[in-house]
Image (cartoon, rainbow, N blue to C red):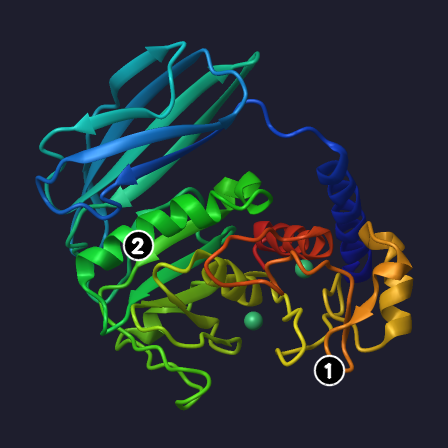
Amino acid sequence: MLYLDKKILLQLCAVMAMFSLFSCKPNPETFAIHTPIYPGSGENVTFSLKKIDGNVENVKLYETVQTINASGAVTATSATVLLQEWNNPGFPIQFVKSGGYASNRIVNYRFEVYGNDKHYTHDIKFATRPYPVSNQPAPVYIVGDINNVLNLVFIPDTDMNINTFYNAVKVDIDEVFHGEDYIRRFRNSYNFFINPFTGHAHDYDTETRDHEIPSNWDQLSFAQGKVILHNRDIRDFAEPDKLLFSAEHYVKGTLLHESGHNFYRLADEYGGGVHWQESELPNNWSSLSACQSAAAGRGMSSADAHQMGTSGWYKLCPASCVMESSGTAMHPYERPCRDRILYSILHRAGGE
Ligand SMILES: [Zn+2]
Ligand SMILES: [Zn+2]
């Protein structure tokens, strides 16, 4: 049975990969965010909806507010309130909640979007600051059950100004995970948290190759990714056994690259990186012949197979893939990497 289940899953992956390759982009395609991402008590909160593409005729914004206690249990829930409605809106849409929310609250906001004969929602939850549950990371952008989606905890480095850090988390959610053309289609597959305790990222070239973890590390085991956002200009790296990586808070391509190692077990695509071959839908191969024979099934041709530097490892992605090209610019995940991403998200949806 296990074998059959796996086979069915792989067939589904193949069908969905074909679908993603040939289908049109979503119409309309919109993204929602709130600012500040982790607001203090009484702080104004701005809700924004931006449009990537398509036709939007009507938008409604609702809120529901829960009161929570020190163990995170809900002790009261407000009525659901319509905050604003827009007809044939210009974008981005914004609504300012003047005076924000009290402490010990979980705010649930929902944009309902109508257009092109479609109707869908952005349903997002966030906590106000300080989150009352001690030692736990604060939920700041929650879209799904933590058991079925990818969870990322942002950890402030000791070298960061905390307000710069909070703003960087908002920018990274909005411009990295909602910015890359492929993974943003899975906007309901990523939850984001902010850790109340600091860590400290090390430089891969000049320091020991282990990041300093926060004091509540044992509470973070639920997350598939933990990232220390830092200010120092250093060479970042991932520790796959800890699902931990580092990134400069302002370098979006590095965040995308390093999260690729943790979330989907994608290997490096440059010579001198870290190479391995996953058993299912790898992006690195240990021989040229294996890489060539995988090409057709991965939307590439055998002529695309080539060695990464002089590493003795091979790949199909072009140099434009973010697993080769990280840094300030945001490069996309190319097709062979997209297969592995889809596979990982499907497994996670099944609770693995
Ligand atoms: Zn890497
Ligand atoms: Zn790639």
Return the residue nearer the eye: 265 or 93. Answer: 93
Q: Identify the image quadrant of the N terminus.
A: bottom right
Asked which quadrant contains residue 107, the reply is top left
Amino acid type indicated by mark 1: Ser
Find numbered disc 2 in the image and state the secondary structure of the residue it sits on.
helix
Q: Position of residue 299 (x, y in %)?
A: 82, 49
Q: Position of residue 271 (x, y in %)?
A: 67, 77
Residue at which label 2 appears: 168
Find numbered disc 1 in the image and state the secondary structure of the residue it sits on.
loop
Q: Is residue 208 above or below residue 90?
A: below
Q: Position of residue 24 (x, y in %)?
A: 69, 28
Is the CB atom of the residue marked by disc 2 within 8 angstroms of ligand 1's nearest atom? Answer: no
Asked which quadrant contains residue 288, the reply is bottom right
Return the residue nearer the eye: 109 or 43. Answer: 43
- Direction from residue 135 to residue 169 in the image, left or right: right
Q: Which is more N-terminal, label 2 or label 1?
A: 2
Residue count near mark 1 (Cα–Cα under 10 Å), binned few <14, some 14–19, many ≥20? some
Identified at 26% across, 23% down, the residue is 80
Residue count near mark 2 (Cα–Cα under 10 Å), binned few <14, some 14–19, many ≥20? many
Q: Identify the image quadrant of the C terminus.
A: bottom right
Measured Cα–Cα span from mark 1 to mark 2: 35 Å
Identified at 73% across, 41% down, the residue is 16
Residue at which label 1 appears: 311
Is the CB atom of the residue marked by disc 1 within 8 angstroms of ligand 1's nearest atom? Answer: no
Q: Nearer the viewer, mark 1 or mark 2?
A: 1
Amino acid type indicated by mark 2: Ala
Q: Position of residue 309 (x, y in %)?
A: 72, 77
